[in-house]
């Protein structure tokens, strides 16, 4: 209050000193008489205005029209108001100094351009130069303070400092000044109210673990106390009253909206109403958004009549707006209706709410579907939630149409969250079951359910919701710190100490990766957990684990746990160092890596040097054994891998008491895991993996990458993407720091499965962990985006890839873009443009690139077979030979595009007769496609015989073509014979689809089910299976169950 009093004093002094009052003694009496008369007139005017305002207030409540005579008497003197003493004083103010105006104009321009950081310096320079600031300059300074102050708790005091300085300098605030101040203070009041509500939600949800009613973290208690003292609404109202009575400030619709909404949120209904009446008197067109807040505010105080009167006021304005009058800004009819319904339900007038709802639906008629769900969600559901009647809220939420509609999902999340906070377990779980786990709001409701489960002592249930929160696709935020700490404490309290700490660590690592500024909150979470353990005498069981594996403190300093740093003398001692041949080890590494200008690795020379070293009673470094094992695996010599391992066990036996030996053996065993994976022996790889875990270490990130890249050859399941994700999570669970190779392997599998959202998630995670994407990463992502036809993002990432400072030019991404625009977009100019970019980068076109060029010229309009032929000539001119795939493109173009079967057959025959040309399946497939396209499937039999004689395997793709052709000819027996000619293990999803379509075309549904049943046994991803199940009319439902 002292600060406000001082401001009033400054204002009065500024006002008085600006008045140019005559001081000649003989004129003093006349001047005083003139002033007294003016004051009396001002009093009279104000009395009339107060009478008008009182009449307006009465008319709003009773609906009685205002007396026109009163209105005229009150408004007529407004013209004379410019002659009040205050106005005279301002009009007598000396002209503004040109320098002051120049500075003010410059500062205003900086403010308009958003160059906030430059404004304080310019303002300071103006003061140093002795130039008196005017209102425009202070307005710019106010805006810069608001924008630049990062500590929200300090922002009001910073703004107050500027305003106080303005009054000290006798600068008269203008309307813009007050709009800035009042608008900011009102918006800050709303922000403070929102922050307090969020903190109160946290107290209810996560608090009370140490003492009932207390926040989980001390910082939250402190923040709540600060916010409770930081509501600037009183100052905003004081400024508003001062400005309209002393300075006659004009306020914008935005300022009225902010101030009225802030008063509504604070429950200050009388001030809210007075502000609205003042806005009406000044003929300001209101924002529609203020009306729901006013309705809700009246309803919260139990004044339903006033709430309805506000609605009537809005309705009248809306009707006028429909008739062409500008009476409302930004119509929000559905929000108003929902607010009225909410008011009725809050006031326990559910029947009234129903009548109003039915009336609105009836008025809207066929358009009711546009607003119906919003009225139910924001009206009935929200009101019942606020009243704590969650069962009714759930019932209304279930009435919202469309399982995945925004209104329904938002309502279900709201019910689940609030019911969980109130301990209504059944309603919370039922509502949560109606929400897909990938919905953005799922995290909040999952946190609430987790917290409820912990409060009720059900740790197993809490673990289920924790799995939702810790899922890799879930985007973590600092809001996850509280549930992570709470879940860890629950796990520790139930005896699962290591698991609780590990889960918490990983979540904190993810949060730190995406939000480094949350470090202090994370540390407070850790302190909370450690304090819980210390009070109960619980020790961390992992403290006795090997120092080779990640320690918990290291885990918090890095996004993922990494190998501990060996520092003490005991930890650096190597009992085998005296016999280690370091120079020989380096030479063996050079042999294996092809260093010193030699071409390629030389395994035999390295082995010879290795054996000579051992004969001399020496041995190489640990890492050299690992390199020898890896090199032998690359050459396919698994026996040699085992021989090197056996020699290592003889030369440098495992001594677990020495950290250096453990670390060395981790690299040797890691190499053995990689070797087994390379050779396809996954079972043996697991054995060495387990040996690593037993000694307190894990395979490297690149070895986990091999686990993923070798999936195809070694697993019966064909859902490689899901397996890849499991392997990736296992790597992180074992404390491995991911590498670019591991991410590339994972993203590659996800891309092939068209799981583009997962691709982008891990791509973003990779960047967040500061793991630089390689050209392989970009190529994989671009290829995945092309698969799902996301042209814009694919091109954006492609440009980003080319701009990489360490970009290594590779043909694969260019081929992906060319193929995308060739097969999906059918855009010839784009295909050729990416080819030109490829050539400009000095990248040598591959056989696939040339095939794409042939296809582009031969299949895209305008078709140019001469240009296609010239591609083959260019290949020959470069000293290379065209490959069968290039001729296959020509055959396909002539037969399928031009329907020139003779021309296609001639190309095929010429290639087959050329004994220097290796014939492969692509040539036959192209010819078969041409024959089927020209309805000549009967002529394929001799070609099949030629294919068998040439030893060419019947591929699934050739089979698909022939099955389709024979089915079109209604020869299902021949189609089925082709299907059976493809071995069970060689069949692709497309093969099953082709045969299913063939059986359905001939109405042999039962046989089609048998084919689909075999497909289901192969373990394909659900997206692939469902595509074929839909042919049977089953999708994933009843028919699918029958087939299974």
Image (cartoon, rainbow, N blue to C red):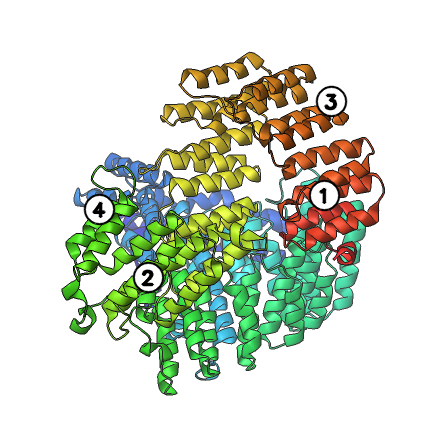
Q: Residue 931's image quarter?
A: top right
> Pointers 4 and 3 in contact (CB under 8 A)?
no
Q: Nearer the viewer, mark 4 or mark 1?
A: 1
Residue 20, horizontal then vertical, whole percent? 29, 45
Q: Is residue 730 left or right of residue 49?
A: left
Q: Nearer the viewer, mark 2 or mark 4?
A: 2
Q: Is residue 849 above or below residue 673?
A: above
The N terminus sits in image quarter: bottom left
Q: Which mark is residue 914?
A: none
On the image, numbered disc 4 is attached to which residue? Answer: 124
Whole-angstrom CA distance, mark 4 to mark 3, is 84 Å
> Pointers 2 and 3 in contact (CB under 8 A)?
no
Within 10 Å of disc 3 (Cα), the crowding (few <14, some 14-19, many 20+) is some
Residue in view at x 54 percent, y 44 percent: 752
Pick the residue in front: 13 or 952.
952
Q: Nearer the viewer, mark 4 or mark 3?
A: 3
Q: Residue 391's image quarter?
A: bottom right
> Pointers 2 and 1 in contact (CB under 8 A)?
no
Q: Is residue 237 above or below residue 217?
A: above
Within 10 Å of disc 4 (Cα), the crowding (few <14, some 14-19, many 20+) is few
On the image, numbered disc 1 is attached to which residue? Answer: 980
On the image, numbered disc 3 is attached to which residue? Answer: 934
> Pointers 1 and 3 in contact (CB under 8 A)?
no
Pick the residue in front: 543 or 377.
543
On the image, numbered disc 2 is attached to which residue? Answer: 645
């Amino acid at each position: 209050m002292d600060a406000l009093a001082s401001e009033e004093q400054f204002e009065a002094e500024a006002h008085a000193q600006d008045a140019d009052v005559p001081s000649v003694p003989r004129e003093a009496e006349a001047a005083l008489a003139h002033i007294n008369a003016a004051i009396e007139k001002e009093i009279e005017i104000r009395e009339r205005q107060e009478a008008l305002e009182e009449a307006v207030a009465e008319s709003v409540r009773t609906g009685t029209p205002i007396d026109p005579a009163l209105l005229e008497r009150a408004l007529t003197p407004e013209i004379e108001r410019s002659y009040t003493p205050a106005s005279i004083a301002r009009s007598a103010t000396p002209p503004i100094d040109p320098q002051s105006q120049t500075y003010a104009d410059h500062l205003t321009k900086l403010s308009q351009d958003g160059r906030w950081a430059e404004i304080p310096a310019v303002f300071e320079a103006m003061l140093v130069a002795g130039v008196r600031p005017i209102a425009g300059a202070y307005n710019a300074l106010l805006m810069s303070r608001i924008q630049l102050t990062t500590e929200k708790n300090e922002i009001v005091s910073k703004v107050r400092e500027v305003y106080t300085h303005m009054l000290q300098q006798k600068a008269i605030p203008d309307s813009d000044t007050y709009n800035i101040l009042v608008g900011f203070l009102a918006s800050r009041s709303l922000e403070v109210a929102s922050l307090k509500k969020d903190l109160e939600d946290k107290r209810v949800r996560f608090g009370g673990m140490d003492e009932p009613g207390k926040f989980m973290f001390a910082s939250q208690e402190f923040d709540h106390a600060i916010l409770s003292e930081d509501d600037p609404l009183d100052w905003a109202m004081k400024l508003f009253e001062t400005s309209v009575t002393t300075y006659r400030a004009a306020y914008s619709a935005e300022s009225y909206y902010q101030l009225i909404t802030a008063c509504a949120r604070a429950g200050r209904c009388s001030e809210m109403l007075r502000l609205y009446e003042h806005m009406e008197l000044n003929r300001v067109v209101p924002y529609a958004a203020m009306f729901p807040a006013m309705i809700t505010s009246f309803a919260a105080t139990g004044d339903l009549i006033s709430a309805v009167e506000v609605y009537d006021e809005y309705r009248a304005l809306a009707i006028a707006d429909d008739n062409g009058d500008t009476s409302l800004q930004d119509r929000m009819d559905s929000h108003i209706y929902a607010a009225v319904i909410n008011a009725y339900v809050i006031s326990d007038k559910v029947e009234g709410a129903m009548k109003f709802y039915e009336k609105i639906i009836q008025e809207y008629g066929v358009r009711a579907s546009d607003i119906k769900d919003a009225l139910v969600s924001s009206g009935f559901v929200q009101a019942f939630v606020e009243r704590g009647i969650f069962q009714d809220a759930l019932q209304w939420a279930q009435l919202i149409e469309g399982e995945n509609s925004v209104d329904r999902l938002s309502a279900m999340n709201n019910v689940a969250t609030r019911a969980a906070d109130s301990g209504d377990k059944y309603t919370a779980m039922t509502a949560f079951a109606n929400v897909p786990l990938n919905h953005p709001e799922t995290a909040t409701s999952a946190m609430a359910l987790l917290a409820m489960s912990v409060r009720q002592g059900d740790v197993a249930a809490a673990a289920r919701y924790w799995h939702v929160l810790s899922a890799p696709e879930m985007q973590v935020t600092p809001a996850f710190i509280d549930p992570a700490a709470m879940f860890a404490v629950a796990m520790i309290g139930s005896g699962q100490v290591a698991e609780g700490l590990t889960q918490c660590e990983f979540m904190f690592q993810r949060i730190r990766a995406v939000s480094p500024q949350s470090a202090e909150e994370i540390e407070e979470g850790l302190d909370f957990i450690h304090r819980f353990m210390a009070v109960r005498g619980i020790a961390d069981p992992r403290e006795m684990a090997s120092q080779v594996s990640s320690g918990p403190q290291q885990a918090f300093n890095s996004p993922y746990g990494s190998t501990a740093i060996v520092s003490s003398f005991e930890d650096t001692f190597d009992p085998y160092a005296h016999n280690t041949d370091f120079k020989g080890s380096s030479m063996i590494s050079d042999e294996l890596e092809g260093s010193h200008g030699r071409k390629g690795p030389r395994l035999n020379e390295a082995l010879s040097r290795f054996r000579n070293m051992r004969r001399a009673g020496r041995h190489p470094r640990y890492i050299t054994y690992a390199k020898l094992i890896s090199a032998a695996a690359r050459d396919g010599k698994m026996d040699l891998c085992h021989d090197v391992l056996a020699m290592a066990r003889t030369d440098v036996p495992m001594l677990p008491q020495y950290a250096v030996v453990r670390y060395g053996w981790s690299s040797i065993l890691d190499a053995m895991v990689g070797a087994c994976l390379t050779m396809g022996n996954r079972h043996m790889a697991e054995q060495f993996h387990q040996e690593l875990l037993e000694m307190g270490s894990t395979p490297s990130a690149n070895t986990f990458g091999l686990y993923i890249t070798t999936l195809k050859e070694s697993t019966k399941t064909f859902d490689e993407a899901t397996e890849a994700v499991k392997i990736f999570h296992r790597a992180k669970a074992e404390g491995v720091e991911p590498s670019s190779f591991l991410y590339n392997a994972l993203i590659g599998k996800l891309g092939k499965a068209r799981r583009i959202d997962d691709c982008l998630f891990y791509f973003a995670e990779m960047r967040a962990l500061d793991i630089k994407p390689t050209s392989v990463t970009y190529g994989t992502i671009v290829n995945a985006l092309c698969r799902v036809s996301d042209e814009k993002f694919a091109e954006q990432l492609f440009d980003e890839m080319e701009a990489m400072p360490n970009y290594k030019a590779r043909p694969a991404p260019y081929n992906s873009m060319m193929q995308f625009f060739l097969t999906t977009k059918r855009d010839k100019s784009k295909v050729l443009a990416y080819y030109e970019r490829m050539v400009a980068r000095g990248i040598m076109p591959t056989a696939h690139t040339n095939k794409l060029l042939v296809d582009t010229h031969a299949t895209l309009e305008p078709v140019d077979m001469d240009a296609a032929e010239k591609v083959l000539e260019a290949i020959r001119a470069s000293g290379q030979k065209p490959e069968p795939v290039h001729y296959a493109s020509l055959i396909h173009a002539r037969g399928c595009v031009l329907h020139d079967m003779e021309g296609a057959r001639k190309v095929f025959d010429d290639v087959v007769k050329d004994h220097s040309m290796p014939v492969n399946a692509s040539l036959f497939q192209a010819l078969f496609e041409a024959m089927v396209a020209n309805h000549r499937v009967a002529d394929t039999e001799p070609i099949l015989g030629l294919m068998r004689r040439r030893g060419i395997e019947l591929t699934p793709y050739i089979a698909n073509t022939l099955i389709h052709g024979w089915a079109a000819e209604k020869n299902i027996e021949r189609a089925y014979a082709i299907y059976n000619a493809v071995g069970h293990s060689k069949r692709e999803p497309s093969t099953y689809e082709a045969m299913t379509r063939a059986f359905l075309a001939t109405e042999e549904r039962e046989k089609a089910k048998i084919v689909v049943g075999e497909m289901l046994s192969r373990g394909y991803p659900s997206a692939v299976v469902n595509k074929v199940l839909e042919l049977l009319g089953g999708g994933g439902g009843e028919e699918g169950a029958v087939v299974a």
